[in-house]
Image: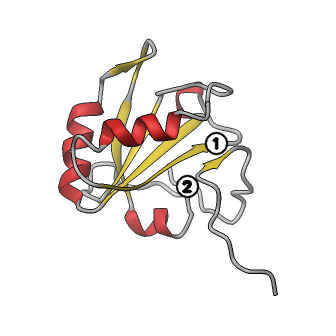
Amino acid sequence: PAPLRPPPSHTPDADLSASSSQPFDRTKASAVLLLENMVGPGEVDDELERETSEECSNYGRVKKCRVVEMPNAPSEAEAVRIFVHYSHFSGARKGRDAMNGRFFGGRAVRASYYPEKSFLNGDFLLC
């Protein structure tokens, strides 16, 4: 069998069909921060993940940053999701407090928590 490889960090047009589109409580503390409306569809570049990870490391130790372009997003603001996995939920809390409502490229960023278990399972479609 072929060796297992980790998935790419940037996932354009990923096959997310195995993920569930279920609602979740964006206010429930988690070590994963979800950033939306930082960029629109087609605006993801090779530097976005690195730049976001560097900025978010000001609030706590970042374990992983992942950019996911969402197929069939209900709005442009939700078309690109950036997940920042911190080593502790306190980093995500500080990041959420600092990033929510902050302007990036003329867009007001929406920052909320995302369930860590879903993130670790590769489920990026919770709404």
Query: Residue, x 43% and y 34% (percent of image)?
Result: 51
Residue closer to the observer: 22 or 30: 30
CB under 8 Å between callouts 2 and 1? yes
Disc 2: which residue:
124
Tell me the amino acid under the disc marked 2: Phe
> What is the secondary structure assignment of the residue under circle 2?
loop
Q: Nearer the viewer, residue 68 or 54?
A: 54
Q: Is residue 1 above or below residue 55?
A: below
Where does residue 52 sit, x and y in percent of width and height? 41, 37
Image position, residue 78 (x, y; %): 54, 34
Q: Secondary structure at mark 1?
A: loop
Residue at horizontal 48 percent and vertical 28 percent from the top: 37
Q: Work out whether 32 lies above or below 43.
A: below
Side (left or right) of 15 relative to 115:
right
Q: What is the C-alpha distance between the residues marked 2 and 1? A: 9 Å
Whichever of callouts 2 and 1 sits on the residue coming sooner in the sequence is 1
Instruction: Determine which residue is flagged by label 1.
Output: 70
Q: Residues within 10 Å of mark 2 (few under 14, many from 20)?
A: many
Look at label 1 and name its amino acid.
Met
Q: In the rendered image, which quarter is residue 34 located in? A: top left
Residue 85, position in %: x, y?
37, 56
Tag shown at residue 1: none
Asked if 30 appears above or below 80 in the picture, the reply is below
For the point 47% across and 62% down, the residue is 119
Q: Residue furthest bottom?
A: 1
Horizontal side of residue 54 vs 13, given as left or right: left
